[in-house]
Amino acid sequence: MTAAVSRVKILAVGAALPSLRLTAGDVTATWGAGARRGTTAVCAPDEDVLTLSWHAAERALAAAGVDPTDVDGLWWGTSRPPFAEGPSLSLLAAALRLRDDIAGALNSGSTLAGLDALLSAWDAVAAGAARVALVVGADALRPGLGTAFEAWAGAGAAALVLRAGDGPATLTHRVARGRPVLDRYRGDREPATRDLYDSRLFREQIFLPLIDDIGAAISDGVDAWSLPDPDGRLGAAAAQRVGASVVSSGEAYEAAGDTGSAAPLLGALAALAAPGVVAIVGYGGGRMSAVTIEVDTEVPGAADVHRVLASGRRSSYPEVLRARGELVPSGETVEMAVPPGSAAFVRGEVEMIGLLGARCIDCGTVNTPPSVHPACTGCGGAKLEEIALARTGSVHTFVVNHTMPAPFVAPLPLVVVDLDDGARLMLQGTSDDATSLAIDDRVELVLRRYTVERGVPVYGFKVHKVETATKGETP
Amino acid sequence: MSWNRVAVVGAGLIRFGELFDQSYEQMAAGAFTAAMANVDKGFEPVQVEAAMIATQRGTLWGQEGIGGNTVPTALGIAGIPCTRIENACPSGSDAFRIGAMAVASGVHDVVLVIGVEKMRDKSTEEGLLARAAAGHPVYTRGESAPVLFAPFATRHMHEFGTTREMLASVAVKNHHNGTLDPYAHFQTEVTVEQVLKAPPVCHPLHLLDCCPQTDGAAAAILVNAERAREFTDHPVYVAGFGVATDHPYLHEKTTFTALPATVKAAERAYAMAGIGPADVDLAEVHDCFTITEILDIEDLGFCEKGKGGVMSIEGETALTGRIPVNPSGGLLAKGHPIGASGVAQLTECWWQLRGQADGRQVTIRNGFALQHNVGGRGSGVSVVNVLTTNAS
């Protein structure tokens, strides 16, 4: 059944992939399975679904030219929220510097969660409950070791900014079908996702009947399709069934594999760069949903998606296993002196994840973090105002630490960065920059997962190089 | 005119090293015995009126909350007033300063200052390196001890052209001095090439740019200057001292080519002693890393800012140089049992001023020796003590 809902616009979009790329053939060769083409995008040890979601959302907000405080709601869809039960949504909102009174919800439970989030946000804007809504679909799938799914499971995030009123693209139609069947499944206490069904059973009895129904409902006039491809083959079958001539999702699957809840959105973003009708079809948890979008003019951020999909560093299978927590060195790890459940986190989480500072009204010095600075380090004054720190700057000095106990992983850069608003911070750098950092390098601050402490992920910003200085020493 | 209200009449230490066979208490007793044995006219434990103990981190040997009572019991003088001083790497030198103030106040005439530190009862990973996970969950995470100084090396090299060879010259000199110090942890020479080729610890610092992890204890006996002659005919006086602080986060530093706490502490100590850097015959300074000694000699006024590397590589800080620095071998060769380090440096100054430093004896022209520590989060605590043989 096609339903026409009150028209809601897409203002801008953004995408993010993690930094590692795993070659599918390396996985299949390890397990003695047949050769497989393609790569999947995999999280580095300090990346996860929250950091990817932050990055995609930041890009979408920047492309939209929307100030974070103008966002009225955050709808986040992921089958793998950073906390199975915990402050996932509020952490993402704080990291994005959204207001603390926003609407929104975390959609989860299946890989349809990203599309569910889009529909929920659409409803909220259409109903007038939110004027500007931020939608993020993201996942960092964790496959079972040695499964066929392992060479296809990926990670990524896609974000859209919705608004009532004017905009370059319009959400027009939606359709949904459901069957109460098990498909991809993960129970409590299970770290890895498993595929329950024989692939032929799934294809013939579940997937193709659903795609036929959906296609019949929305295929008229569609110029480009984002289609589900949960195993690397069904995408082609779906394209044939709906009669798609342009499948925009192919590029994202090729680059990143199956990005779960991100996949339907990620597969559509690039198509929003050109006028026409784009259909997004998603599948998960026994349900298939689709929306159509009419693009009038290029949606800001859409053209940048090709660059994001082409990024990343090729990684070895052992490196990926280590990043996923499958390969763990033996021995003790040192505990964080301040446990995540302690009062220091209650006092300091917002300023830490929102990257806030306290600017002295008298002398202008920026003191970080505010909660430990009742007095200014510059002049001793007590008149301080909280500010959101700049997230770009230059390297003032740095070290690369090679000697730390587990769970630290060497080489670890620690960078003193002079931010473009005059603040100075010391933060960890990313491991990829360890061998090339130099004084005066231009850097940006990106949200990363610092550690998983006593089972709880702890997030903060890290320094990441954006371009190389013309002079300076290298390690 | 120096302050000179307090005299040091005895000082001593145990041989530093990985003292797996000695307990914290045994090390303390050893240092106390050594200091008493060095009192010219004899000293008995019962003469101690009060004690200041410096132990920086009890957690390194499984003692979370060590107080002021562990050491008196170990020394057989339980019951005396005793306070534990913990002020980062300058803990020992600050215990000395506070002990001197206790004597100068007239409350006590005889005060024992003793620094004791167990660094190696725990593995490196569980011990000293565990500080990488201490402090702020993000802003100091990964900040093991070399991180407090290595960014200064990076910047000093960038701004002043200081080279790794210049850093290495500090290690080579201090290891040479260590071969002449029977109390040093390391008593072997190292070459510039060995320092340069050592494995990286925290870029740009490599293994031999770093002090070792060392167990040790040192003690000094402070008395009212008016009573010094009861104990010795060759007293050494406390000429002055200074302590200063700086912000605890590295990102709060306004400079990465100087340690402002050292500059301020030195200004205060010089003013109190009525001297300037040119009057100092020798200095025992905080060389936890090679770059630290280069910063120290600049911040203490022994050379212009930026010239510390050149001054070192040209030999001006050698035993026979213009201003001998770390004749004991410094923390790099003698070792750095944190609470004991300052007291051991003062012991070396005491020996040097009394002409008792044997093969490493430097020329005493003016009768002043300077002792310095700096450390803590953001290298934000520094203590400078000045000793003299000149009766005021």
Image (cartoon, rainbow, N blue to C red):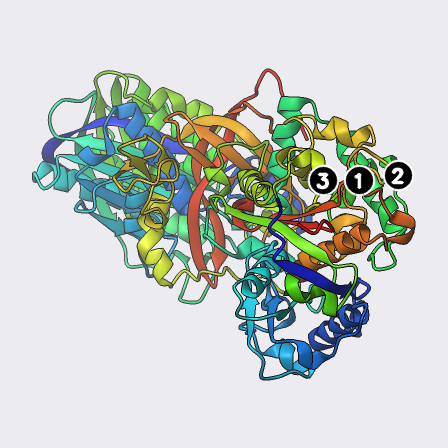
Upstream in the sequence, badge 1 or badge 3?
3
Which mark lies nearer to you, 1 or 3?
A: 1
Distance (Cα) linking label 1 and label 2 = 31 Å
Q: Which residue is mark 1?
A: B365
Secondary element type, mark 3: loop
Q: Quadrant of residue A247?
A: top left
Q: Is residue A76 left or right of residue B363?
A: left
Q: Is residue B93 left or right of residue A240?
A: right
Say which mark, if any, is on residue A354: none
Instruction: Please name whichever residue, B61 or A125, is drawn nearer the observer in this view of the structure.
Output: B61
Amino acid type at mark 3: Val
Q: Which residue is mark 2?
A: B191
Q: Residue A459: percent from the left, percent from the top?
A: 42, 48
Q: Is residue B359 above or below residue B294?
A: below
Q: Residue A124: percent from the left, percent from the top?
A: 13, 42
Residue drawn at x 28%, y 59% is: A180
Secondary element type, mark 2: loop
The answer to whether tags 1 and 2 share a subunit is yes
Q: Chain of mark 3?
A: B
The reply to whether residue A85 is visible in this rendering is: yes
Tag 1 near tag 2, CB within 8 Å: no
Q: Is residue B56 above or below residue A383?
A: below
Q: Which residue is mark 3?
A: B280
Q: Residue A410: percent from the left, percent from the top?
A: 64, 46
Q: Quadrant of residue A378?
A: top left
Instruction: Please name whichever residue, A329 or A197, is drawn nearer the observer in this view of the structure.
Output: A329
The answer to whether tags 3 and 2 share a subunit is yes
Amino acid type at mark 2: Thr
Q: Chain of mark 1?
A: B
Upstream in the sequence, badge 1 or badge 2?
2
Amino acid type at mark 1: Arg
